Image (cartoon, rainbow, N blue to C red):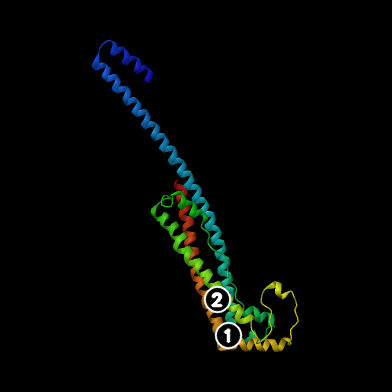
Amino acid sequence: MIRFFRNVRQQLAAQNKVMAYLRYAIGEILLVVIGILIALQINNWNEHRKENVKIKTYLKSIQVDLNNDINRFDLIINGLNKQIRANSLVFRNKNYQTLPIDSIVQTISSYFNDYKIYDQTFQKIKNSGLADQLGSKELNDAINNYYTIDLYTFNTFIDYDEKYTLQDDEFWFVTDEYEINPHFASIQKMNLPYKENEETRKLAIIKKIESSLGRNYLRNNIARKTLGIDIVLKLENKASLLTKMINAELNRK
């Protein structure tokens, strides 16, 4: 087409038809400009399509991460409730004192959870510059809040609970008041001999449990685990809602 215009322009120039020549020259320029604009539009469309594909991939990856979080949250909540029930026996029923010593140890034992929310996918999204282009403003805000504010709250609790659970272990198991194996299964299997008989050791443990300090250690652990349940439940609800929002966004794309 451009070659055609060039031939026409040369013929008109040779015939000294200036106005006709100018019209064809302008037409040729417009044709080139239109071609460039079309090429740019096609390129922009391709880039937009590639960006949408990348966003969908990221959203699907976040969904996988959230489902993993939800499954783990259920386990964490069950574990925290189990510890609360065990520790509460000391306050609700003195029959725990008739249990074998190993069962009493389970009653006062505390465990911490080492699961943390990981945000590798979210960090990739931030590095790609797409953190505010994942969908609606509501969805963008929900994802950003989950992986900033909520992640910080959860991980801070995990660190806090680990610190004080380890202190609880020292209080109950690192003492000169009695000999006792920690609640770790590997230690239990060692069958190390004790200096005193089981009944003497059992009475010493019960005495410590029933002391004001021992009861306060258990109260604090119950309060800490209750706080943990509240934090995890709220986060689990947010994660569930977020998966639904992402699913709705994927269906629109």
| Labels 2 and 1: the sequence-earlier one | 2
Residues under labels 2 and 1: Cα distance?
14 Å
Q: Residue at x 32, y 22 (%)?
A: 28
Residue 22 % position (x, y): 26, 19
Q: Secondary structure at mark 2?
A: helix
Residue 222 visible here:
yes
Asked if the residues shown at circle 2 and circle 1 are in contact, with their CB atoms under 8 angstroms apart, the answer is no
Q: Is residue 236 above or below residue 84?
A: above
**Left or right of residue 111: residue 124:** left
Residue 232 % position (x, y): 51, 67
Q: Is residue 224 above or below residue 66?
A: below
Quadrant where the N terminus is found in the figure: top left
Residue 209 % position (x, y): 60, 86
Q: Nearer the viewer, mark 2 or mark 1?
A: 2
Q: Is residue 236 above or below residue 95?
A: above
Quadrant where the C terminus is found in the figure: top left
Q: Residue at x 29, y 19 (%)?
A: 24
Nearest to the observer: residue 14 or residue 199: 14
Mark number for residue 164? 2
Residue designated by label 1 = 214
The residue positioned farthest toward the left in the image shown: 19
Nearest to the observer: residue 200 or residue 89: 200
For badge 1, the amino acid type reads Gly
Residue 1 visible here:
no
For badge 2, the amino acid type reads Tyr
The local crowd at label 2, few if under 14, some if 14 to 19, many if 20 or more residues have their Cα within 10 Å, is some
**Left or right of residue 2: residue 51:** right
Q: Secondary structure at mark 1?
A: helix
The local crowd at label 1, few if under 14, some if 14 to 19, many if 20 or more residues have their Cα within 10 Å, is some
Within the image, what quadrant is residue 76 found in? bottom right
